[in-house]
Amino acid sequence: MKKNRDPNKNAKKNEDISPETFATVVIGAGPAGLIFSLINRICLDHRNISSSKWPLFLLEKRTRYVRNHRLQLDKSEFVRVQKRLNSLHFDKFVQFLENTNYRPVINELETFLTQALNKFGVSQTICDVGNSFRQSSLHDVRAKLPHSFSQENKPWVIVGADSVKSTVSKMLGNDKGRITGTHEYLIRLKLIGNHLPKSINIIENFKLSKVLSSVLSYRFNKNGFAEMDLFLDPSEYYAVSWLNANPKNPINLTKEVLDQLNAPFFKQVIISFIESHSKVSLQQIQLQSSFKLEHSINRSRVRHLNEFNAYAFLVGDAAISLPFQRGMTAMIKCTYELSEVLFSIFDQLTLNESTYQLEQCKSIANHYQVQSELIAKEEIKIVSSRASLVRGLRQFIRINAMLPFPIQSWLLGYESNFSAKSINITHFLLNLLFACCASLSMGAALLLMLNNKEFWSPLTFIIIGFVLQFIGGFIYRANFTFTNQVHIFIKRIWQIQIVSWMLLGIGIILFKIIEISSLIGALLATAWWTGGVFFGIGLVLFDQLGRYWLQEGKL
């Protein structure tokens, strides 16, 4: 498929074509429908084809949607299309996007595109297309077209750009062929109050994420409130999603609601947020919505409608709906490819003016199916990699939230995340036993090194110490399962033990009590770090085994 068109190519031939040879009806005046229409009219202008020979009708069921959220766009794809089009009209569109840092408010984006299309003589027509009693069927839509199209069976094209729950797709019988997949589970909170921070730095974000044991994203809105997105495990997500909160009917997260949800981490993350920003005066915390980040791809994005002598194509979310801001990227790619396909169909029809039958253009129309499939596969790879990154980061934060290492828990954590209520003596003594035994084993290795004893190898005691440390991590993690939350005193046992090992290692290095070149001396000097690794391995092992047992037992 040629990407660069000669403006004068076929110019003479097109002048001989009768008026209103070909028509395009775009159903849905959202970003997808508007951008497709703009690209199509720009290309029409490049080829010196009169809009009377190829009219475009833009249908929308409402006069206006109130949508003030921002889109996040991939700059590279819009710049790529800009270079291909080489049009002042699209240059102005890209400049508009640059002025918004490629994060335009959706209503402002639609207003700009609508004004740009008005310069090409394209305006919106209010028409609710669908199968219900009060909606307009495709027969009704055709009847509203100019006389030559409604009566003489001239070829026309339907472009469905009407959201993921596409009415056009349902009318064409394509809605049951969607491929779906869930990548992440998200909950959005709205914080209303005074002195909310404009942003939170990386360290504070990490500390708050550890409280939640998940990934957290904070954004301040210029209207004075803040939004906080929480990427959760499926179990945590479903524990909250049953409230059925949505932006129109948010749920106030009062103490009573949180207690009812049995979601202590949600309560704790807000408490920690206030603690880290003492000037913050929160008035309200709302659960705005809970939703899954899913992809939804229509298997069939092209269909020939023999009774209308028409082809129907799907673009935007009606064709390919993607999370992680890749939906708009897929949309701009697909709209450009579809415009290329339609011009190829137009050229094919003008070669045989006597029939104007779209059926002869089947191979050209199917090219859009092939190209959009390649686009979908490429974008899903990007979406899947981003979802994997979020899951990996969530697991990293989750494990870090449980680890009792001094530096990362005292400096990069909130102590209130651990219980200070009545302690379970059995759990306390068990953790104390293994922590002390591991320390005694390391102490014995140090004494043997200092006294040069031959009958016991210091390495044996070092290995025993690491094994005990591994078991300690295992039983420490077991506390989270059996008591839901580890007591702060149990955490202190391992913090003090690892700090003692660290200070001993620093002393060995500074005072050269043991020759550093020796393998045993190096092991003792770094025992705090190595022991911490073994402790972490034990913790992770129990964590993974626990998840496996829960899944296998369907608990």
Image: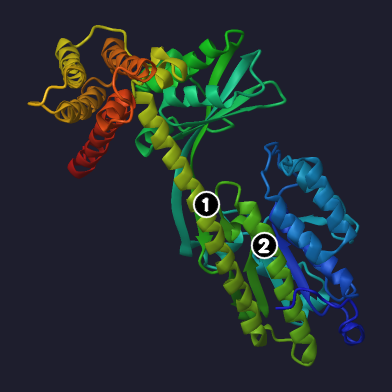
From mark 2 to mark 1, how far is it between C-alphas? 16 Å
User: Which image quadrant is residue 69 in?
Assistant: top right
The quadrant where residue 67 appears = top right
Residue occupying image coordinates x 69% and y 20%? 224
Q: Secondary structure at mark 1?
A: helix
Tell me: 550 left or right of 53. Answer: left
In the image, 176 versus 343, the foreground residue is 343
**Position of 248 relative to 429 (above/below):** below
Three-letter code, disc 2: Lys
The quarter of the displayed image where residue 204 is located: top right
In this view, the residue in front, 289 or 280, is: 280
Q: Residue at x 42, y 31 (%)?
A: 397
Labels 2 and 1 touching (C-beta < 8 A) = no
**Residue 144 in sight in this render:** yes
Give the vertical position of 358 relative to 142 (above or below).
below
24 w.r.t. 383: above or below: below
Q: Quadrant of the N terminus?
A: bottom right
Q: Does residue 135 show up?
A: no
The residue pinned by badge 2 equals 333
Residue at the far left: name it: 455
Q: Which residue is mark 1?
A: 383
